[in-house]
Amino acid sequence: MNRLFFLLAVLYLPLSHSNAREAKEYDNDINYDELKVPHYDLPKLLIGPNGEKISTTDKWENIRRPQILSLYSNLIYGRVPEPEKPLNITFKLVKEDKGFMKGKATRKDIDIIISNDKDSKTMRFLVFSPNGVEGPAPAFLKHSFNNTKSNDFDASLLRKGKLKNGWPLGEFFDRGYGFCAVYHEDLVGHNEVSFNNSIHKLFYPKGQSFPKASEWGVISACAWGAMKAMDYLETDNDVDHKRVAIMGHSKMGKTTLWTAAQDERFALAIAAQSGCAGAALWRRKSGETLKKMVTRFPYWLCRNAWKFVDQEDDLPIDQHMLLACIAPRPVYVHSGVKDTWADGRGEYLSAFHASEVYKLYGKKALDSEESPPVGKAIIESHVGYHIREGGHSIQSFDWKRFLDFADYHLKK
Ligand code: GCU
């Protein structure tokens, strides 16, 4: 990677913002043409570090999966270092409303306070659980773009059981699910570049003020936060922490996959239009590329990832391997026809190739390299998928399929 590019990336920082959809309009070096996708060879999932065949789930779990996770930690998302000073983590119930949505659900606002003598950070975790159900409920945990401290979630904003942003909370409660949310900016800024006021600060030993090249970027920090939220759920009797589906859209879809890959407490994962650094294969270079991502969002990944800009073939991983690390827990990938920036075809292929590991576990997974027809959801499989008409969003149709997938796997 040349120095000029680094310099350009740094100069670009003050201008960068989150709306890369606009970028699509004026960038003329993006490929959306399937015929122009380069030839590529994916790294093999079931070959170990010494060239040995990974023929059993034991070998997968003890040799290959840890190796792959370590590659992701050190080269792509960045690993969370050991803090020099132990962290003190407390859960504080800020508010409880047992009559949410005319008594359909209970809403809890919980502060997860993380501190040591360097600093303190608070995550506001929202937990909605359906009332009148038997036993603790299965739930979705959303990596959310909505600020959990705002009134975005007020019952007064619900119209026909949906929040203004389209989240069908009523449908979740009617189908017996809880709904939880963490906010992506509680621990680290959306496009953080200084890491001086983020969760990272608590982890710096004397003399350090910025993550090392192999240390956590923004996505890793958000993933870590969701794991703290899971620590809380393990203490909450209204939610069945063994049946929690982690989910997220776009940047948070990427984060969802990285969270679920690392933390086996999440029973299922749903990555909506996660695209580049999510489900889409790096090597296809279709839609958003590594170069585009690190130019606009330099620290979503760790700095080691920069070294692979325009060198995707040198990556020891591709994104099918991230999905495979979730196995044998069910994973669902969602794409949109018009969401070409996220490369729906690449998202599907990743799910298809990850299926090899699910099959090693004897699970039903994707058999066909062909993407399914638009609007047809693959639900009865450990690797689920749908692509629908339209662009970059989660629509009513998508929510229903996510719930169908969770029903199939979590309510058996
Ligand atoms: C940008 C970015 C994508 C990301 C998206 C989002 O478009 O380039 O990688 O998925 O923002 O989070 O909405």
Image (cartoon, rainbow, N blue to C red):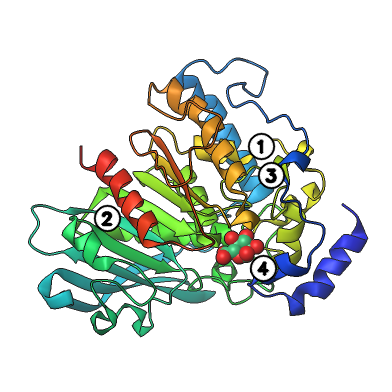
Q: Nearer the viewer, mark 3 or mark 4?
A: 4
User: Based on the displayed image, in which of its 4 quarters is residue 265 positioned?
Assistant: top left
- The answer to whether residue 327 is above or below residue 138 is above
Q: Would you say the residues marked 1 and 2 are in contact, meaning their CB atoms lie under 8 Å apart?
A: no
Q: Amino acid at mark 4?
A: Ala
Q: CA distance from mark 3 to mark 4?
A: 18 Å
- The answer to whether residue 76 is above or below residue 378 is below
Q: Would you say the residues marked 4 and 1 are in contact, meaning their CB atoms lie under 8 Å apart?
A: no
Q: Nearer the viewer, mark 4 or mark 1?
A: 4
Q: Which mark is residue 139?
A: 2
x, y percentage for residue 344? 58, 48
Residue underneath mark 3: 282
Q: Secondary structure at mark 3?
A: helix
Q: Secondary structure at mark 4?
A: helix
Q: Nearer the viewer, mark 2 or mark 4?
A: 4
Q: Which mark is residue 317?
A: 1
Please state which of residues 387 and 305 is positioned toward the viewer in this rendering: 387
x, y percentage for residue 125? 35, 70
Mark 4 residue crowding within 10 angstroms, few (<14) / some (14–19) / many (20+): some
Q: CA distance from mark 3 to mark 2?
A: 31 Å
User: Based on the displayed image, in which of its 4 quarters is residue 3 positioned?
Assistant: bottom right
